[in-house]
Amino acid sequence: MSKPAIVPLANYHLFPRYQTRDDYRKAVGVEPPPFDMRRAPKYWRDPAAMAATRNNVVYANVLLMSELGIAIPGSDGRPQLDVLVLSKAEAATVNIPPDATNVPGADVPEVPMPLRNLEPGMQLEFGFAGVVRVRDTTVADDTVGGFTPSDRALLEAIARKLGV
């Protein structure tokens, strides 16, 4: 099986992402801390943060985001990376809103997820609808207009079945 040219950004997350409070409970085995509407939502935690020798923890690779939570392109049109500095207490914990909608404080951009370093030949890019993804520039992209060869074969089979 060939290596994909496009890799989800989640493959480069430095820590697990807990989408819901229940996801956190199942993965970690304890109830997440109560949601604090004065802090931005945060769906990850650094379990080693409290052992840091300094009061703050620095993460070298996070997406540079606008105040609306949208990744900002650089002069080359690709997503930019920035640094993130958090207190070790903040880094060590999550701030996951309840599952209910319209929770005060949950409507602000989340704390960005730290990323591990990209391997040589990998680069960040914007995909459909501005979603950030990782492209392996060492692999030929076999998509044409966003369709892979198997997508095209399926569409051709559907067209034959419909007689078009």
Image (cartoon, grey):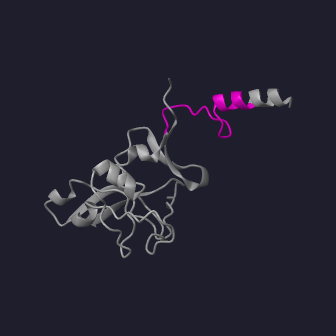
* Quadrant housing the C terminus: top right
Q: Which residues are magenta?
A: 136-155
**Residue 57 appears in the picture as rendered:** yes
Q: Is residue 51 left or right of residue 18?
A: left
Query: Tag count in the figure?
Result: 0
Task: Specify the quadrant of the image occupied by residue 120.
Answer: top left
* Percent position of residue 118, x then y: 38, 43
Task: Specify the quadrant of the image occupied by residue 109.
Answer: bottom left
Position of residue 147 relative to residue 32, above or below, is: above
Q: Residue at x 32, y 48 (%)?
A: 27
**Residue 15 appears in the picture as rendered:** no
Position of residue 129 relative to residue 37, above or below, is: above
Q: Residue furthest left?
A: 53
* Percent position of residue 149, x then y: 65, 29
* Percent position of residue 110, x then y: 42, 64
Task: Specify the quadrant of the image occupied by residue 61.
Answer: bottom left
Q: Residue at x 36, y 69 (%)?
A: 35
Q: Residue furthest top?
A: 1
Q: How would you classify the magenta stretch by its main secondary structure?
A: loop
Q: Residue furthest right?
A: 163
Q: Is residue 147 magenta?
A: yes
Q: Is residue 143 magenta?
A: yes
Position of residue 22 relative to residue 143, above or below, is: below
Q: Residue at x 35, y 65 (%)?
A: 95
* Percent position of residue 40, x then y: 39, 69
